[in-house]
Amino acid sequence: MKNYGLSKNERIKSKRLFDILYSNGKTIYSKNGLFKAVFYLSQDVNTTGVKVAFAVYKKAGKAVWRNRVKRLMRESYRLNKHILTENIKEGTLLISFSPNKVNSKNYKKIFLNDVQPEIVYLMQKIAEILSVSPSLQNNNFKKSSE
RNA sequence: GACGCAGAUUGGGCAAUUGCUAUUCGGUUGCAAAAUCGAAUAGAGGAAAGUCCGAACUCCGUAGGACAAGGUGCCAGGUAACGCCUGGGGGACUUGUCGUAAUGGCAAGUUCACGGAAAGCGCCACAGAAAAUAUACCGCCCUGACUUGUCAGGGUAAGGGUGAAAAGGCAGGGUAAGAGCCUACCGCGUCGAUAGCAAUAUCGGCGGUCCCGAAAGGGAGUUCCGAGUUGCUCGGAAUCUCGGCAAGCCCCACCUGGAGUAAGGCCAAGUAGGAGGAACUUCCACUCGUUGGAACGGAGUUGUCCGCUCCGAUUUGUUCCUUGGGUAGGCCGCUAGAACUUAACGGCGACGUUAAGUCGAGAUAAAUAAUUGCCGCCCUGAUUUUCAGGGUACAGAAUUCGGCUUACAGAUCUGCGUCAAAC
RNA sequence: GCCCCGGUAGCUCAGCAGGAUAGAGCGGCAGUUUCCUAAACUGCGGGUCGGAGGUUCGAAUCCUCUCCGGGGUA
């Protein structure tokens, strides 16, 4: 697997996985509240690794602006994905990134330097939560197995 | 040369690093499907947008007839088709110029959803006498009366006034005053001729109530006058050119079956073969049955009716409706087409014909990118080699084409107008 | 992608086969009443009828374009 690549297998593509993510996942926000992420460590999926999705709600702006934000978020994740991939030993981590307070009115021109620190912060926070409280997940796993 | 307007074309370039999607080739894994790695090639628009029209394509199915509903609307052509485009015609407005007593003529530009208002219905507030079978406030004129400047009766619609709009315009005649009351011209209608495929134009005739008629004339309607008399009859005279709204209803001509690529087809996977409800009627014929015909009922025919099609059991069926559950994976459709470029020919033009050449995205929680550097263009400041900072539009394919509409920084070209300079 | 609705006062809605001051309820403000408040009563203000253009003498209403909001659709 490429160190800085992002192929189809590393993205969430089915409706079933989205249902699992949004019904069980936790939501966290970046420092300024500009972006948010929904994540969930699933044991049901056969594969191991990280699967991500990038979603922009329709009211945020026109199609050109939405496409650009999606590409910038994807680029930010692609360049820093080692933060999460090194820590995942079993199960599949599902993440969905989306803009929260950012829209085309307050950021008419948006650049990678605006997006990347926020996404990196979110990824570091997710890694921190997963490593600090592994027992919580073990409990959850036990409960689901029982 | 500068500025403005109109039209057409175009819609930043190069390099490096890291990525995504598709195709082809090669390697690895694998029985295969496929996965993965590497290389090469390709990878958003003039509007991809709005979804306002028209088609292709696909299915439903009978789409047949009548009505309804919707759309289009000067004429001709182009086109697969159109509400689009081209050419022509006509109107309106503006400017210039010529001219008249006045209306106007000619030229240029802009612009027009531009069939019908004498088929019918409806509406036209306020103001005004009167708003559509006309009417009479101020006036003007005549007659009479007397209180001699007013009243009464009548005529008239030129002028004033009202209004968005006042029942052809204007000049002359005419008159008590006036009026298509009469005449010329203009306008309007109609008929004919000429030109034109046609819209229409030009010329001529006729028309100031209509119909019949070649004409003379006859008939009818309306108004006025007179008589009989109380709502009609008789006699005579005269003769209505016509407001706007159809983006109100409507009439005429032409067009339209419905749904939409999540159409639709195939493969894989997979649960359930469920629950509830409705209908299943008569008659006739015979070769006596899974028969034929007629009526009736139900369902379908996506507005209604006719017509058409299917079904109508006597024991777990048939048809139809409602509802519950399971799948949400892959492939095809999916890009070579009413395609594009160039040339020749035909045509005023839109466009067409022929020949040669070209292949230019195909995604599906949805690729076509991110960052950096240099250059180009614009602005600002220092300065007048250059440097610093900022900006570089509108905007992202989703079945595909033809249009329309809307958004848009800059660049190039063409034409026209104004200004400046030179000859 | 495709197909439909809606936009009128701060809010919820009338008015839309055209006619001049665009209404109703709630809310707001002021006053009466009360020791004060609520309730009740009286009065008042508040609208480019989403925007632009057209038809008409006249448009919230009819037509065209456009902006915004909402819904449905295997």
Image (spheres, coloured by chain):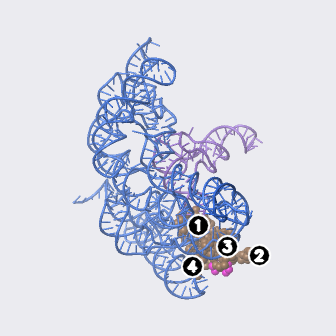
Chain colours: A brown, B blue, C purple
Q: Earlier in the sequence, mark 3 or mark 2?
A: 3
Q: Earlier in the sequence, mark 4 or mark 2?
A: 4
Of tags 3 and 4, the one toward the viewer is 3
Cα separation, mark 4 vs mark 2, equals 39 Å
Whether residue A52 is visible, yes or no, is: no
Q: Secondary structure at mark 3?
A: strand
Of tags 2 and 1, the one toward the viewer is 2
According to the picture, the residue beneath numbered tag 4 turns out to be A4
Q: Earlier in the sequence, mark 3 or mark 4?
A: 4
Cα separation, mark 4 vs mark 1, equals 23 Å
Q: Quadrant of residue B226?
A: top left
Task: Identify which amino acid the numbered label 1 is placed on.
Answer: Val
According to the picture, the residue beneath numbered tag 1 turns out to be A56
Q: Residues within 10 Å of mark 2 (few under 14, many from 20)?
A: few
- Give the residue at x 58% y 64%: A58
Residue range corresponding to the magenta coloring: A84-91
Cα separation, mark 3 vs mark 4, equals 23 Å
According to the picture, the residue beneath numbered tag 3 turns out to be A40
In contact (CB < 8 Å): disc 1 and disc 3: no
Whether residue A47 is visible, yes or no, is: yes
According to the picture, the residue beneath numbered tag 2 turns out to be A146
